[in-house]
């Protein structure tokens, strides 16, 4: 089994269910991504070997963290840097927090910027 999938399946509930839901939405929204395991985290990469986003469960929440987030302008009330300089994420504390419409819109916008550099 893919180590990234092991990461997800080995998390305690409710985080495992949240990560699985995020995985399904990401993989059904953006088709040209590979799920890889980098930096001890599940990461989505383009086949051209550039990063798209990664999943992280820490403390009491799950993050979907986006590279090239400098280009993401929609939903600023949801997409936050949380102390990071160059990355922004969607943070979920419980499964009910996952708004799939917001997630899909951000995934599509992030995908539209895939050819751009990391920094704006």
Image (spheres, grey):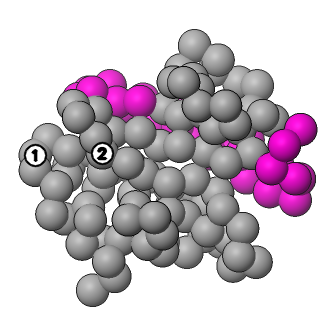
What residue is disc 2 on?
57
Nearer the observer, 99 or 39: 39
Rate crowding at label 2 as few (under 14), some (14 to 19) or many (20 or more) other CA atoms within 10 Å. Answer: many
Look at the image and tell me in which quarter the C terminus lies. Answer: top right
Look at the image and tell me in which quarter the N terminus lies. Answer: bottom left
* Residue 92 image label: none
Instruction: Mark 2 vs mark 1: give the one in front.
Output: 2
Residue 70's place in the image compared with 55, above or below, is above
In the image, which residues are magenta? 91-120
Residue 21's place in the image compared with 81, above or below, is below
Which residue is depicted at the point 57% across and 13% down? 77
Nearer the observer, 34 or 57: 57
Question: In the figure, is residue 17 to the left or right of 29?
Answer: left
**Total residue callouts:** 2
Which residue is depicted at the point 41% across and 30% down? 91
Residue 94 belongs to the span the image colors magenta: yes
Can residue 91 be seen by looking at this rendering?
yes
Nearer the observer, 11 or 82: 82
What residue is disc 1 on?
13
Can residue 105 be seen by looking at this rendering?
no
Nearer the observer, 1 or 32: 1
Question: In the figure, is residue 93 to the left or right of 43?
Answer: left
Residue 106 belongs to the span the image colors magenta: yes
Which residue is depicted at the point 80% across and 57% down? 114
Which residue is depicted at the point 27% across and 27% down? 93
């Amino acid at each position: 089994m893919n180590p990234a999938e092991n990461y997800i399946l080995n998390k305690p509930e409710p985080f495992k269910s949240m990560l699985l839901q995020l995985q399904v939405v990401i993989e059904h929204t953006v088709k040209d991504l590979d799920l890889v395991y980098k930096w001890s985290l599940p990461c989505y990469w383009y086949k051209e070997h550039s990063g798209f986003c990664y999943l992280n469960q820490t403390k009491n929440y799950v993050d979907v963290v986006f590279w090239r987030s400098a280009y993401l302008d929609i939903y600023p009330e949801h997409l936050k840097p949380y102390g990071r300089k160059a990355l922004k994420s969607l943070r979920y504390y419980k499964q009910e927090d996952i708004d799939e419409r917001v997630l899909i819109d951000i995934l599509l916008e992030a995908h539209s910027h895939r050819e751009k550099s990391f920094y704006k």
